[in-house]
Image (tube, rainbow, N blue to C red):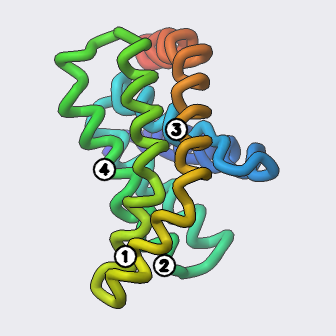
Amino acid sequence: MPVRKITRIALLSAILYVSKVALEFLPNVELVSLLTVLYTLVFGKEAFLIVTVFNLFELIQWGFGTWWVSYLYVWPLLVLITLLLKRVIKEEFLIWSVVSGLFGLIFGSLFAIVYLPVDPAYALAYWISGLPWDVWHGVCNFVLMLVIGKPLYLLLKKVRTTA
């Protein structure tokens, strides 16, 4: 793998991580969803590597837990969804805002999947108890993508072409 690509993956992963840490004081307000979508739009499948490194940063900081197991499929799933929709939605950031908002809305249900094999009733209770936070997460994701999605996307495209 070229040094330039390794450096880009490391830097974009670090930006994901720092953006999450910087906003931790605001419950369910994060830039990880927004940046993951934008990284996928601009850098394609490379985003899988970016979210993998981000997940490793999270593991180093917080240690192992069921939440981390969820991170192993939640962020790659967002990359996959974005890759599948990329040719259809293109640069329509109102639609990407809806996608991002829906992802925030289902975030808790994706985390509940880990508990299904252990206790389906607990998984359901876990998901339902977090629904108000998922709604807030969805609203924040929608607004963030709507307000700063396109400017950040254009900036990332410029960085990609000059780097």
The answer to whether one can see residue 131 in this image is yes
What residue did someone put label 4 on?
Answer: 77
State the residue in front, 140 or 5: 140
Q: Which one is nearer the viewer's eye here, 80 or 132?
A: 132
Q: Is residue 9 above or below residue 64?
A: above
> How many other residues sit within 10 Å of disc 3, few (<14), some (14-19) or many (≥20)?
many
Disc 4 residue type?
Leu
Q: Residue at x 33, y 51 (%)?
A: 76
Residue 133: x, y in percent? 61, 52
| Contact? badges 2 and 1 (CB < 8 Å) | yes
Left or right: 42 in relation to 130: left
Residue that carries the numbered disc 2 in the rendered image: 66
What residue is rendered at 41% in x and 25% in y?
Answer: 98
- For label 3, the SS is helix
State how far apart marks 4 and 3 are (Cα): 16 Å
Q: Which residue is mark 1?
A: 114
